[in-house]
Image: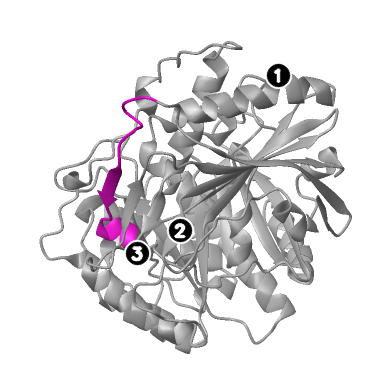
Amino acid sequence: MASSNNNISIKIIDKCRVSPPPAPSTDVTVSLPLTFFDLFWVRFHPVERVFFYKLHSPPSFFIEHVLPKLKTSLSLTLQHFLPLAGNLLWPSHSDKPILQYNPGDGVSLLIAESDADFSHLLGYNSPREASETRCFVPELETLESRAALMSLQITLFPNSGFSIGISTHHAALDGKSSTMFIKAWASICQSLEEEQEESPTLVREFEPFFDREVIKDPKDFGLLLLNHWSDVMSKMFPDENNIKKSLKILPFEPKVKDSVRATFKLARSDLEKVKKKVLSNWNSNVNNGDDEESTNTPPSTLSTFVLTCSYVLVCIAKAINGVFKERQKFGFAFTGDCRKRLEPPIPENYCGNCVWGNFVDAKPEDYVKENGVVLVAKGIYKTTKMLGIEGFRGVEASAFDKYMNMAKEGVEILGIAGSNRFGVYGIDFGWGKPEKVEIASIDRGLTMGLAENSDGNEGGVEVGLVLNKQVMDLFRTLFREGLEDD
């Protein structure tokens, strides 16, 4: 069985289901309710990532040693993350879906081989066809009545390396939780001896905490979310079957036609340049209507998140506007981790969703202005500062109205996935750290993927993008010129 995509050929070697090992602890049914943090993502597209690892060994070594170890350690890891081997279900008697693992459940695993140029896939700054990464991402099965929570694909690039592609259902995991699972898998794999029957001890920091009772919802925000999302989705996707209890993922299809994917690096020195420019021009053109002293007084410093997002987002907006003149209104929304912001705070190893969306307080026209980086940086800084002061403010129905109103006004919402704090470039299964990590699912929207720098540059970041080819060309120019010394 084989498939191809442009110039890339994929040969399917095997397709199997990996289950937790037989044991009294895995021979039970486990059900978890969804919190309002989870319910927000019930019909959202899966989060898809690909880890690329170099391996200069013959295919026989991969098949005989690497692959069995990856599969065995995956099974052993699932016994610690039992709900993830199950499915998202919506019981007929319930007004909300649940996560449920039944004995025998497991994760879909696809084993493939590719003739793709491995060094080409590892490149930076040089765009390549957006569809190429899709070859190494597994599909996540979702039906009206049931949805898988995770699927995996391991692809061999003979004599060059291999990749691990993972698709996760966002209703089960946020980015921090899915990264914790991969780190746990890598940790067990690295410490597993060949033909070892007993599972290595899982490092404490990777032990998941699944208890949903720690997230309180006395006002039943979860039901409010489901109802509001049902209304919003029926307007966004009028042709879809909007059965209230449907679990089918809505068609946020990958936008790969005439699009390219590229990853760009921002060194610590680059971010210092952006910070210097922003702070020195903080009050050069005060944003109309923003008369708060706290925002107009320059802060002593700015976070990597504020600097990266403001610079990259403005480059994106100006590139889009430069190619498509009619597109000139933009907005930015990001999710913030609420684990420490809940009252009381919940454990850092909580495994599920504990992030909430925030709209940045910047005018839609600010992104394409000459001093756009300053204006957007101020907006992001203000939003993150209020998040730090007020913590999680609860579910606001007005946020749905705000989103719909912005869409009606032609405002394009820019988003972000990943984090430079996840530490994805430290995930070593035993054959070295990844050469590159891509968030494949950024091609389903106007989204930038964020991670720490792969080269160990402390304080640096890398940003993944999927854009129209012409837009990407202009973005590269703006991105490079904006970092040149004055």
Q: Position of residue 361 (x, y in %)?
A: 38, 69
Q: Give the residue pinned by disc 2.
A: 147
Q: Is residue 106 left or right of residue 440?
A: left
Residue density around tag 3, few if under 14, some if 14–19, many if 20 or more, within 10 Å: many
Q: Give the residue pinned by disc 1.
A: 65
Indicate the colouring scheme: one colour
Residue density around tag 1, few if under 14, some if 14–19, many if 20 or more, within 10 Å: few
Q: Give the residue pinned by disc 3.
A: 40
Number of marks in the image?
Answer: 3
Q: Residue at x 20, y 66 (%)?
A: 221
Query: Considering depth in this image, is 75 or 345 the residue closer to the camera?
Result: 75
Q: Are marks 3 and 2 in contact (CB under 8 Å)?
A: no
Q: Residue at x 51, y 34 (%)?
A: 182
Q: Are marks 1 and 3 in contact (CB under 8 Å)?
A: no
Q: Can residue 29 be seen at all in this image of the molecule?
A: yes
Q: Is residue 31 left or right of residue 265?
A: left
Element under disc 1: helix
Q: Can residue 289 be seen at all in this image of the molecule?
A: no
Element under disc 3: loop
30 drawn magenta: yes
Query: Considering depth in this image, is 9 or 16 the residue closer to the camera?
Result: 16
Q: Which residues are magenta?
A: 23-39
Residue density around tag 2, few if under 14, some if 14–19, many if 20 or more, within 10 Å: many
Q: Which mark is residue 432?
A: none
327 drawn magenta: no
Q: Residue at x 69, y 57 (%)?
A: 479
Q: How far, Cα to Cα, is label 1 from label 2?
A: 32 Å
The mark closer to the camera, 1 or 3, is 1
Q: Is residue 152 above or below residue 312?
A: above
